[in-house]
Structures are given as C-alpha cells and as structure tokens.
Image: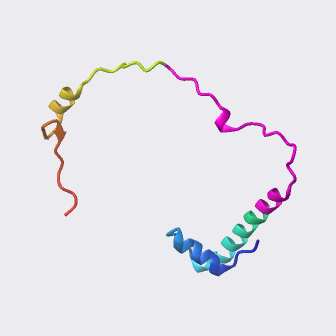
Amino acid sequence: MSIDVDEVKKIARLACLQVDDADLPSYATSLSNILDLVEQMNAVDTTGVTPMSHPIEAVQRLREDVVTDTNRRDDFMAIAPASEDGLYLVPKVIE
C-alpha cells in the first residue's frame, strides 16, 4: 500500500503532529514500507498453526491483600503548609 505526501499531512493533522515539509516524503516512504510489511504478514497462510501464547490464557499469581501501612494522614496534614477539613490548600493556578 502506498501512502503519498497528502495522506501523511492528513495523518499528522489528525494526530496533532507538526511535520516539516522536507520530512514528508521520508515519512510517506516509511509508512508505506510498514504497511507493505503488514500486507506481507497478512498474506501468510496460518491455518493449522497453533498460537504459541496468548495473554488471555495467562494466569497471574496474586498475593493476599493485607494492609501494611498505617493511616498517617494526620501526620502529613500537620506538616503541610496549609490544610483545611482534611484537604491540602494550594494557590489558585487557573483564572
């Protein structure tokens, strides 16, 4: 599959990327090469091939959910520059 410079511009605009005009031809070539490789992989006949692994079949070892840290909220609030009703007070940054 061949991608031209206009399509690269459109993709860059949709992805909110700024691409220099001088780099557009190389991006078009690179993207075309990637899509050609994907087409080659899709053309391979994989019937009868058993998948080697799949993330859905993976089993995760879980540990017991045990509380290890104590609640130190009051300690942290005591050293905060400003707090009120259990919340940290910070300067307004959006006007």
Seen at 73% across and 63% down, the residue is 34
Q: Residue furthest front?
A: 48
Q: Pick whichever, 37 or 19, lies toward us.
A: 37
Residue situated in front as seen by the camera: 80 or 83:
83
Image spot of residue 15 (x, y percent): 53, 68
Give the prevailing secondary structure in the magenta stretch: loop
Residue 21, by quadrant, is bottom right
Give the quadrant of residue 29. bottom right
Task: Using the image as rendered, state which of residue 30 and residue 60 is in the foreground.
Answer: 60
Give x and y (percent) for residue 17: 52, 69
Q: Residue at x 18, y 55 (%)?
A: 92
Specify the quadrant that holds the C terminus: bottom left
Colouring chosen for the image of the structure: rainbow
Residue at the spot x=65%, y=38% of the render?
55
Please provide percent x and percent y for residue 22. Answer: 62, 79
* Left-right relation of 67 to 17: left
Residue at the spot 86% in from the left edge and 47% down from the top edge:
47
Q: Is residue 74 above or below residue 8?
A: above
| 62 horizontally vs 48: left or right | left
In the image, 87: left or right of 30?
left
Boundaries of the magenta span: 37-63
Quick check: is 54 in the magenta stretch? yes
Total marks drawn? 0
Give yes or no for residue 62 being in the magenta stretch: yes
Q: With respect to residue 41, does 24 lie above or below? A: below
Q: Quadrant of the N terminus?
A: bottom right
